[in-house]
Amino acid sequence: MSKLLDGVCSELQRLPGIGRRTALRLAMHILKMDVEAADSLSQSIARFRHDIRYCAGCNNLSDETLCPICSDERRDRSTICVVEQVADLMSIENTGQYRGLYHVLGGVISPMQGVGPSDLKIDLLCDKLLTGDVKEVIIAISTSVEGETTLFYLMSRLKAFPDVKVSTIARGIGFGDELEYVDELTITHALINRQEVNKK
């Protein structure tokens, strides 16, 4: 194999979920691209990595000091949705059902990965709550063991703000899932978060 091709494949394999075969397929696709398109791709990646910032308000990715969401005066500033990563924020935002602000933790507590509470943006969240403007915090993090640990820690920290309502997104069985294949933790959450059925 060409040393140049091998080098590109090695770099692409550093990306999550990219194995040797996928890296080779991507490298060959790049090779077939126009030189200008390939240059544009590499320049965009370099610009993104060098120039991207984290929003001072919510820790979202931004080109400016504040992201477009935090800068939008039409958003409900009394509600903050807490998520793990920027990708989670984007998923919620794409639904068009939430018009409040966000707070990106930057991960979850994971002792096995060496991630503790101090590695997350929890203090920044608490600083926002000190203003007294926030009435509700919605916690929208994963139901993994690490997510549950993070939720437990957040709840303990948020006890310092008795006037702030704390809620979590509904957790339970997904639409179309068969009950026999659902794990016990998910069923537990589904039972706890059950809804009353309208008989009319």
Image (cartoon, rainbow, N blue to C red):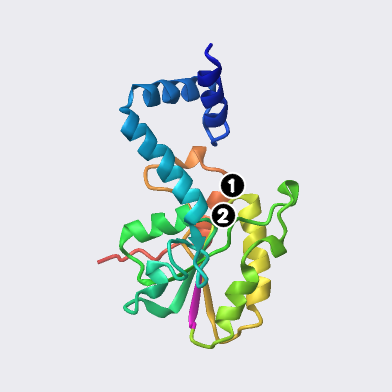
The C terminus: image quadrant: bottom left
Q: Is residue 7 left or right of residue 145?
A: left
Q: Which residues are magenta?
A: 134-138
- Say which element carries label 2: helix
Looking at the picture, how far across and down is residue 123, in whole percent? 65, 73
- Among all residues in the image, which is located at the extreme top? 1
| Tag 1–tag 2 contact (CB < 8 Å) | yes
Numbered tag placed on residue 184 in the rendering: 1
Q: Amino acid at mark 2?
A: Thr
- Say which element carries label 1: helix
Looking at the picture, how far across and down is residue 35, in whole percent? 34, 29
Establish if 149 lies above or below 156. Answer: above
* Identity of the residue drawn at 52% across and 71% down: 56
Looking at the picture, how far across and down is residue 137, in whole percent? 51, 74
Looking at the picture, tell me which residue is in the foreground, 11 or 142. 11
Q: What residue does disc 2 label?
A: 188
Res. 173 visible in picture: no
* Identity of the residue drawn at 59% across and 47% down: 184
* Identity of the residue drawn at 49% across and 19% down: 21
The secondary structure making up most of the magenta span is strand
Establish if 23 lies above or below 198. Answer: above
On the image, which quarter does residue 73 sit in? bottom left
* Identity of the residue drawn at 60% across and 50% down: 144
